[in-house]
Image (cartoon, rainbow, N blue to C red):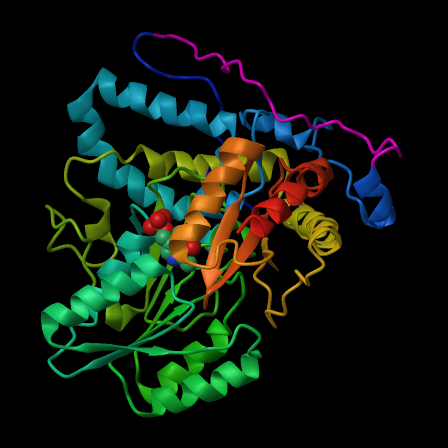
Amino acid sequence: MGAMATKQPDNSVDVDNGEQLAEPEHEHTVVDEQHDGDDDVADQADATNRPEPLLTRDGSPAAALWSLNSRWRHINHGSFGAVPVFAQLRRLAYLQETESAPQRWFMAAPERLAQAREGLADFLGVDADRFGFVPNASAGMTAAIRALMLNVGDELLITDHAYGAVAFSARREARQRGAKVRTVPIELDATPEHILTVLGKALAKKPAGLIIDASTSSTAREFPVVALAELATKHGVPLLVDAAHAPGIQHRPAEGIAASAWVGNLHKFACGFRGSAVLVAEKKFAKNLYPIIDSWGMDEPFPGRFDHQGTFDYTPYLASVDAITGLEDRIGWDSIRGYIESLLDYSTDVVADALDAASGEESRVDVAAPAPGMTLLRLPGTLGASHDDAQAVRQRITDELGFETQVTSFRDTGYLRLSAHAYNTADDYERFAEDAVPTLVEWSRER
Ligand SMILES: Cc1ncc(COP(=O)(O)O)c(C=O)c1O
């Protein structure tokens, strides 16, 4: 990755009371387990592909940068992420700075946000004047959907892989404006070529807009967004890309995507704070793009008006940039991405083999174009087959089995979605295969 444009943060706190923050004491994830040869699951898996725990540039375990409680194995980075301790301390420092002189803080906030955008531009692969901060992907997509300014009778297209809450936003906006949302079904194993054919035909009918997820949440697959953006441009149809998972797991994720709007969360693979996301917009589309909170920046051009969202906690935006630059400094994003890929390859096999052996069913799923950072395995029987059941199974896995993982449903089938990050180790997934999988199969048989 290219050099970051911002100054690297230090962890000292420059606040008026002069207090120095200490790194909090936490139970860290166990990081230094070596494969001891006695472990059934690891023995059955291809041990040559078993990644050693990731190390920082100074040779210490990467996991020690986080404050995850080892009582739960966190193998669901894709949902809520996890913030390293050095960035938590930066956020605390910003909060202390706010509370030491609130007026001074808020007067300077827009300028600091503009600087923070400069610091993020290279990481995202777009110029700083092409994107604004939004609180989350939902806010960014809501703002982009509003900017379509749907008219009575218009048709807005989504696919059946769209993130549920974003689909709700599309339907609400369409309903209020007398427009319609049409859902285009896409098979789980549809190839990128097939998707381009199906959506190409739909675009030729000139809908008012198309919403596409770059990496889908319930099905952990990719959509060919670069080619879709070209197709949408050819047909003059605004394309809104929900790339909630992209920052961090993709190198310069927004680069070269000619979409009207593109939204990415900073709290997922980029390891920033919940409450921080970016909305990238094409120049013409940006003219009608306003934050969902109207405020004093109203008359400023995009993206300046997104630097004003009323009296609001802006610290997640600033500290998320510190998380990103700090991880480049301490580990390097290319190393993190390489590690995630090899760890997921290995652990998907480990968990899939365990599921297949215990259930007698096939858990591996062909998603044609797997999303980076996440993999999908089919759950046995009817486990997780509906949205509500998926949520209930996920809760049971956390409460009864001690793993934070994601369970999704798509077309009446339940899936386990695994993800990984720098702090995870092969042992996390081996433990899941050995300790959780037999119970999951038992639950499926009790039904
Ligand atoms: C594809 C996709 N879009 C949107 C969202 C919503 O993100 P947020 O809850 O941060 O708004 C998510 C969250 O997981 C997602 O996976």
- Does the magenta-highlighted stretch encompass residue 22? yes
Along the line of sight, the residue nearer the viewer: 59 or 155: 155
Choose top left, top right, bottom left or bottom right for residue 283: bottom left
Name which residue lies at 51% across and 77% down: 187
Residue 264 visible in rendering:
no
Along the line of sight, the residue nearer the viewer: 435 or 229: 435
Q: Is residue 343 left or right of residue 308?
A: right
Name which residue lies at 44% across and 13% down: 21
Query: Magenta region, mostly helix, strand or loop?
Result: loop
- Residue sticking out furthest to the right: 37
Name which residue lies at 67% across and 25% down: 30
For residue 234, above or below residue 270: below
- Does the magenta-highlighted stretch encompass residue 405? no
For residue 159, above or below residue 407: below
Q: Is residue 385 left or right of residue 358?
A: left
Residue 411 visible in rendering:
yes
Q: Position of residue 225 (x, y in %)?
A: 47, 72
Q: Position of residue 117 (x, y in %)?
A: 36, 47
Q: How many marks?
A: 0
Q: Which residues are magenta?
A: 18-39
Choose top left, top right, bottom left or bottom right for residue 112: top left
Q: Is residue 384 left or right of residue 374?
A: left
Q: Position of residue 91 (x, y in %)?
A: 38, 27
Q: Position of residue 215 (x, y in %)?
A: 49, 62
